[in-house]
Image (cartoon, grey):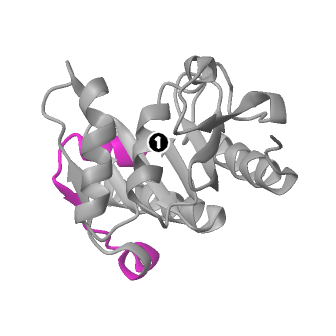
């Protein structure tokens, strides 16, 4: 089962860019692409997302969870649930942009005051998981349910990071970048 050279190149390009912007770190982050209605590729658990190669990705079948699932990113269940519930999701990323994640700790939504944030995103709700003790078990279901019930492709989770999906990987990366920039500008403007 071939993954598709264009998908690998798209993921490699965007992943490096997001890593360089500090949206991914050595410890956390994930990126994936839908291959068919029942399969997707995702980075492996120990992949550092600045050097994604074909060997750093794994193709998974949603209908048969075999041994390969244990090699995938720890976020694999979140990606699977989004692909199962959101038919328009072609690409998914879990990032932890520092300004957006920091902003999430003290606010209930991001209301961008900069031009691009206001025009492209509008208000972005911040989801509070309340209890981190069982978040790992709840996250796949609560995140996919949030996307199903809210008209957004971005979910900023208090103290956890940002989940995003889109039909176009570049658009997904742009939205993550715009949100991070809006939060950075809000933080800088609060000092004046």
Crowding around mark 1 (Cα neighbors within 10 Å: few <14, some 14 to 19, many 20+) is many
**Residue 185 can be seen, yes or no:** yes
Where's the N terminus, which quadrant?
Answer: top right
Front-lying residue, 175 or 44 = 44
Residue hosting label 1: 80
Report the number of numbered marks: 1
Q: Which residues are magenta?
A: 99-119
Q: Which residue of the protein is positioned furthest toward the front in this rendering?
A: 63
Front-lying residue, 71 or 17 = 71
Please indicate whether residue 145 sits to the left or right of residue 22 in the image: left
Q: Is residue 109 inside the magenta stretch?
A: yes
**Residue 22 can be seen, yes or no:** no
Q: Which residue of the protein is positioned furthest toward the right in this rendering?
A: 5
Q: Is residue 105 inside the magenta stretch?
A: yes
- Residue lying at 73% horizontally and 35% vertically, measured from the top left: 50
Q: Quadrant of residue 169?
A: bottom right
- Residue lying at 41% horizontally and 72% vertically, measured from the top left: 117
Residue 107 in percent (x, y) is at 17, 50
């Amino acid at each position: 089962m071939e993954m598709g050279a264009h998908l690998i190149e798209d993921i490699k390009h965007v992943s490096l860019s997001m890593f360089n912007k500090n949206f991914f770190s050595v410890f956390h982050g994930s990126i994936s692409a839908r291959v068919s209605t029942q399969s997707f590729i995702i980075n492996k658990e120990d992949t550092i997302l600045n050097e994604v190669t074909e060997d750093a990705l794994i193709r998974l079948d949603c209908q048969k969870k075999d041994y390969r699932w244990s090699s995938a990113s720890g976020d694999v269940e979140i990606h699977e649930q989004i692909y199962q519930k959101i038919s328009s999701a072609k690409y998914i990323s879990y990032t932890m942009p520092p300004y957006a994640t920091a902003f999430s700790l003290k606010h209930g939504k991001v209301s961008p005051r900069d031009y691009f944030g206001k025009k492209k995103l509008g208000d972005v709700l911040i989801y509070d998981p309340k209890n981190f003790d069982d978040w790992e078990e709840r996250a796949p279901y609560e995140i996919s349910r949030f996307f199903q019930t809210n008209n957004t492709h971005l979910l900023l989770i208090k103290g956890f990071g940002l989940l995003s999906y889109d039909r176009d990987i570049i658009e997904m990366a742009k939205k993550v970048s715009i949100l991070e920039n809006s939060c950075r500008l809000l933080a800088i403007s609060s000092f004046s």
